[in-house]
Amino acid sequence: MKRIFEGAVYDMVKRTDGFVFSCRTEVFEGEMLMFYKTVDAQSGIIADVSNNIYLLAKFGANYKSVIKPVSNIITAKTISLPSGKLFLCDKDAGGKCYLFDGTGGILWTGVIQYRECVPSDIALYNNCVWASFIEHNVLIRFNLATMREELRIGGTRSPFSKPRSIFIEGNNAFVSNVGSYSLTKVNLDTYAVEDYCQFDRSVKSYLAVADREYVLLDDGIYEL
């Protein structure tokens, strides 16, 4: 495991050739500025990008329309859907969710919560939204058509410990646990659960792209 970026990173957004991420730096007398960077998974090159590149990767081609009702573009979670549609969960607005069409128009709005808590992350599998709830140690599957809860993994006796994020690759969900400093792999067809990777500090996020794997820890981004 090697660190490729040191600093305060907020999120990582996958692209076809790598990912973009948002980070902050102290510039003068305690003032913080937000920056956006891209990682090329093939070359390993990290470069500065404009906020437009970050918004395009996270919110799609209609990002100018999509972000208008969003409380916080950094903490908001998104899922790209077929035909240019986008599903968005606004965490800072109490879990308010939007389904946008291919032009950025709103098709549906609603709320995703579990025991009055909002999702810490969302991901898509088989036309269903999977959401992690860090306060209750659960993953919950919601039907994308009805947004009704269909299945729950975890709870009182849970394989998760403060599941902050969820990344789905193939039929596997990789859950980042900030409580147990571990990655948990869940087969979303059989619901088999296994330990995937252990760390010596909180793991906040994970993604895989171009046969490479990355994790976000407290002090920056690492390649596994």
Image: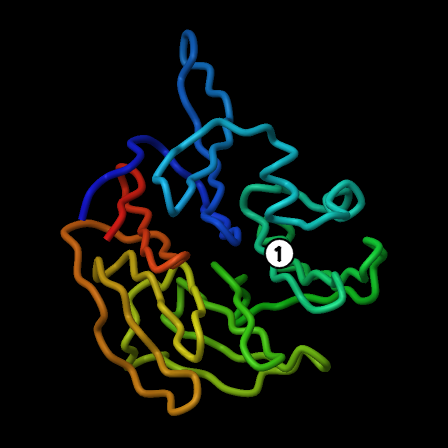
Q: Position of residue 183 (x, y in %)?
A: 27, 64
- In the image as oriented, which residue stretches furthest toward the bottom? 190
32 w.r.t. 142: above or below? above
52 w.r.t. 87: above or below? above
Looking at the picture, the colour scheme in use is rainbow
Horizontal side, residue 56 vs residue 172: left or right: right
- Residue shown at the point (30%, 71%) measured from the top left: 160
- Residue shown at the point (43%, 89%) measured from the top left: 189
How many marks the image carries: the answer is 1
- Residue shown at the point (20%, 64%) measured from the top left: 197
Horizontal side, residue 160 vs residue 101: left or right: left
- Residue shown at the point (83%, 65%) measured from the top left: 107
Q: Position of residue 32 (x, y in %)?
A: 46, 20
Q: Position of residue 139 (x, y in %)?
A: 44, 75
Q: Quadrant of residue 179?
A: bottom left
129 w.r.t. 207: above or below? below
Amino acid type, residue under disc 1 in the picture: Gly
Residue that numbered label 1 is attached to: 94
Element class at badge 1:
loop
Horizontal side, residue 50 vs residue 170: left or right: right
- In the image as oriented, which residue stretches furthest toward the left? 200
Q: Of 46 and 11, which appears nearest the observer?
A: 46
- In the image as oriented, which residue stretches furthest toward the top? 29
